[in-house]
C-alpha cells in the first residue's frame, strides 16, 4: 500500500462558521459539541478500499429529501492523487441514497484553500418506496477512495485553487 494522504479536522473556527451557515438555528455551543465528537474517516478492514465517513450528528432524511452536511474533515493529499467520495454502498442499495454531485472529487490542492479544504457532502434519499433514512451520530454514511490520476503530455495548467465548488473556473 502507498501512503499518500492524511485526514484531519478543519480548525474549530472554520467548522463553527460553516456549521452555523448550514444550520443557523443551532448555537455556537452546539457546533463546538459536534466538532468535539467528529471522527476521522477510517477503513473497516485491511482489505477495504474505502474510508468510511461518519455522520457528525444523527439525522433523518425522508424519501425525496436532501441534506447538506459539513463533515469537519479535510484531506491532505499528495500531488497526483485524488479522493473520490461515494455514498455507503448499503445505503445506496436500500434507500437510493446518493451524493447530489454523483461522485465527489477532492483534489490534492483543495486542502490549501481559504476554507481549509472543508469537505461538505450534499445527499439525497431518492428511494421511491417512501422509506425514510435515519442515521445515528457516528454512523458511516459515505466512503472515500484515493485514486492516482494522470495528465496529458502537453498539460500546462497554471491555475491556483482558492475555494470549493467551482472555484477553479472562477475569474
Image (cartoon, helix red, strand yellow):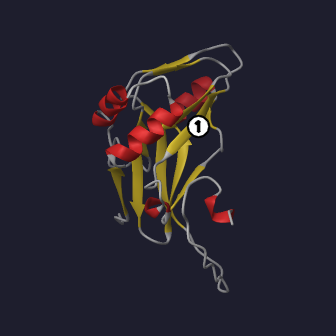
Residue at 28 percent of width and 35 percent of height: 36
Badge 1: few (under 14), some or many (20 or more) residues near its Cα, within 10 Å?
Answer: some
Residue at 34 percent of width and 49 percent of height: 11
The residue sitting at the left extreme is 36
* Between 33 and 24, the one nearer to me in the picture: 24
The residue sitting at the bottom extreme is 154
At which x and y percent is residue 83?
49, 56
Q: Is residue 102 left or right of residue 90?
A: right
Q: Is residue 75 above or below residue 56?
A: below
At which x and y percent is residue 50?
44, 47
The residue sitting at the top extreme is 130
Q: Is residue 33 above or below residue 109?
A: above
Residue at 46 percent of width and 33 percent of height: 20
User: Does residue 164 appear in the picture of this structure?
Assistant: yes
User: Does residue 71 appear in the picture of this structure?
Assistant: no
Based on the displayed image, in which of its 4 quarters is residue 149 positioned?
bottom right
* Between 115 and 156, the one nearer to me in the picture: 115
Based on the displayed image, in which of its 4 quarters is residue 26 positioned?
top left
Q: Is residue 84 left or right of residue 12?
A: right
Where is the C terminus found, in terms of image quarters? bottom right
Q: Count of labels shown?
A: 1
Q: Is residue 3 above or below residue 70?
A: below
Q: Is residue 132 above or below residue 78?
A: above
Q: Check disc 1 and report the residue beneath it.
A: 122
At which x and y percent is residue 82?
51, 61
Where is the N terminus found, in terms of image quarters? bottom left
At which x and y percent is residue 115?
47, 53
For the residue labelled by badge 1, is the local secondary structure a helix, a strand or a loop?
strand
* Between 135 and 116, the one nearer to me in the picture: 116
Residue at 46 percent of width and 49 percent of height: 118
Amino acid at each position: 500500500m502507498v501512503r499518500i494522504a492524511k485526514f484531519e479536522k478543519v480548525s474549530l473556527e472554520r467548522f463553527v462558521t460553516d456549521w452555523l451557515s448550514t444550520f443557523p438555528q443551532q448555537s455556537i455551543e452546539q457546533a463546538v459539541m459536534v466538532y468535539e465528537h467528529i471522527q476521522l474517516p477510517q477503513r473497516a478492514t485491511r482489505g477495504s478500499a474505502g474510508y468510511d465517513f461518519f455522520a457528525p450528528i444523527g439525522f433523518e432524511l425522508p424519501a425525496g429529501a436532501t441534506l447538506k452536511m459539513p463533515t469537519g474533515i479535510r484531506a491532505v493529499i499528495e500531488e497526483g492523487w485524488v479522493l473520490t467520495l461515494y455514498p455507503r454502498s448499503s445505503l445506496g442499495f436500500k434507500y437510493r441514497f446518493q451524493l447530489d454531485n454523483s461522485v465527489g472529487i477532492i483534489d490534492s490542492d483543495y486542502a490549501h484553500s481559504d476554507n481549509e479544504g472543508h469537505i461538505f457532502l450534499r445527499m439525497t434519499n431518492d428511494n421511491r418506496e417512501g422509506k425514510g433514512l435515519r442515521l445515528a451520530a457516528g454512523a458511516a454514511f459515505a466512503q472515500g477512495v484515493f485514486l492516482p490520476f494522470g495528465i496529458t503530455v502537453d498539460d500546462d495548467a497554471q491555475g491556483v485553487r482558492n475555494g470549493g465548488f467551482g472555484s477553479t473556473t472562477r475569474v
